[in-house]
Amino acid sequence: MFKTAIVPRVSETDGAGHINNTVVPIWFEAGRRGIFRILTPDLAFERWRIALVNMNVDYLAQIYLDKTAQVRTWVENIGIKSFSLYEELWQDEQLCSKGTVTYVYFDYKSNKSKLIPDDIKNALQQHALDTEK
Amino acid sequence: MFKTAIVPRVSETDGAGHINNTVVPIWFEAGRRGIFRILTPDLAFERWRIALVNMNVDYLAQIYLDKTAQVRTWVENIGIKSFSLYEELWQDEQLCSKGTVTYVYFDYKSNKSKLIPDDIKNALQQHALDTEK
Amino acid sequence: MFKTAIVPRVSETDGAGHINNTVVPIWFEAGRRGIFRILTPDLAFERWRIALVNMNVDYLAQIYLDKTAQVRTWVENIGIKSFSLYEELWQDEQLCSKGTVTYVYFDYKSNKSKLIPDDIKNALQQHALDTEK
Amino acid sequence: MFKTAIVPRVSETDGAGHINNTVVPIWFEAGRRGIFRILTPDLAFERWRIALVNMNVDYLAQIYLDKTAQVRTWVENIGIKSFSLYEELWQDEQLCSKGTVTYVYFDYKSNKSKLIPDDIKNALQQHALDTEK
């Protein structure tokens, strides 16, 4: 599991006074930096290996500007050509959002999905939900 | 159905050269302006009536900076205390993303969900997916 | 002069109830699409020709979610290797923000500034502030 | 001086492969959290005390996704009704951006500027550029 501290920004609030709903996917993506490094160690876009195919987010409680939040990121499932993550957003010991994303392993030059290599599968497996929970 | 034209911004691209995944929820929210006006005609936050509980997005094709996009927004389902929308993002006659969101009708003062009034239900029904498709 | 209509988004407001200050530079950049097309007609990043060196923004009046805004973009000055733009943000017949940006004509491969070609200078000149005002 | 660590996000890059220009003002605002706490200790928007009147940013070097950045924030000048900050963005021991912002001390209810109270002036003075440099 990867833990990522997030300090909420004024620019991320909205007129209702809380963190805007569209910010949660941005924070969840920020929490995937460790996952991205497994796939592209130097984070260089010319070696980017994955494409997002689905995102699902449950909004459970409001998120406030005043307190640091934390994103927790697990690998939920590893398939032949795709994998999914499970993500949680915590603030003040409350689970505020949770969700899943599915990425396909992808060759941007040929514009096609590809088999996930075994070394990548093994590295992802170190962060698997069932290993840890 | 509401149609909303979106001109992609340089700031909405990412290093992979396309529109970043986290921008699609932002555009879909932009496409809900007509829905928001049904609930809060002057868009004043002190009279905001809904809270998001779930968002699901399928990413089907890459979105480019060069061409105008269009968000299409339908009411998918109207319940007792909540309703859901179905949303599509089109660019260059291609469906690039589609998704659903569920909002609960909400009283921000008491922090509780409420029954959707009949006049709101009727106004939402004018934009229902089954009425139009 | 380029005019760009901007429909404010809920995600662009902040907890003070207005459009957040950091959104104005985003809207001003959105207003430069016509300028970007002069330099890179297909907006392809591998042919991007300019780099920002300075941005200055005056905030004159609050900007609201409820009404469409308009960005107006002029070329203020054209130099040997750089040019500057003058930009205004209007809402409801009120000037809400104004500013300038300076871009250097730039070769991203050699990482060096370059002379602006005459045809680009002429195309920029069509949108000059002194020509129009 | 306040130091704020910033981990760049994929969503903050643009198609040119670096951090987009419009993100620097967002990071600089993030770096003002300590300043905002002097004015509004609980960061509650109903007690927000300042309004931005000018922002100026110099862009000196490109900012990359791969490495953590740092915002440094000083109080540059304290006036009767307004104050200015001086801000720097560092990455990998290089100064990438610097800028100033001017805020007016403001009463959002009467929509008027106000005198800065002495205790606020004293607290701001602890972070003054001339005290530290």
Image (cartoon, coloured by chain):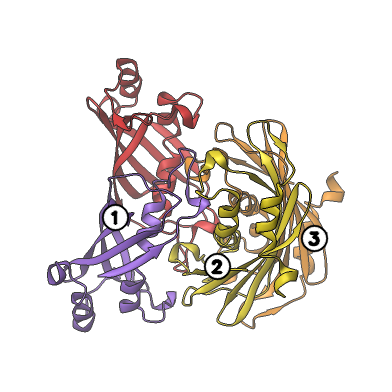
Chain colours: A red, B purple, C yellow, D orange
Is residue D20 in view?
yes
Mark 3–mark 1 contact, CB under 8 Å? no
Q: Label 2 vs label 1: CA separation? A: 43 Å
Q: Label 3 vs label 2: CA separation? A: 23 Å
Q: Residues within 10 Å of mark 2 (few under 14, many from 20)?
A: some
Residue D112's disc is none
**Sooner in the amino-acid sequence: mark 3 or mark 2:** 2
Of all residues shown, which one is farthest toward the top? A119
Camera-nearest residue between D131 and A116: A116
What amino acid is labelled 1 in the image? Glu
Percent of width and height locating residue A107: 35, 28
Asked whether the residues under marks 3 and 1 belong to the same chain, the reply is no
Q: Chain of mark 2?
A: D
Residue D122's disc is 3
- Residue at image x 37%, y 62%? B29
Q: Label 3 vs label 1: CA separation? A: 60 Å
Rendered image quadrant of residue B25: bottom left
Image depth: mark 3 or mark 2 in front: 2
| Left-right relation of D24 to B1 | right
Task: State the residue position of label 2.
Answer: D45
Q: Chain of mark 3?
A: D
What amino acid is labelled 2 in the image? Phe
Mark 2–mark 1 contact, CB under 8 Å? no
What amino acid is labelled 3 in the image? Asn
Rendered image quadrant of residue B35: bottom left
Task: State the residue position of label 1.
Answer: B93
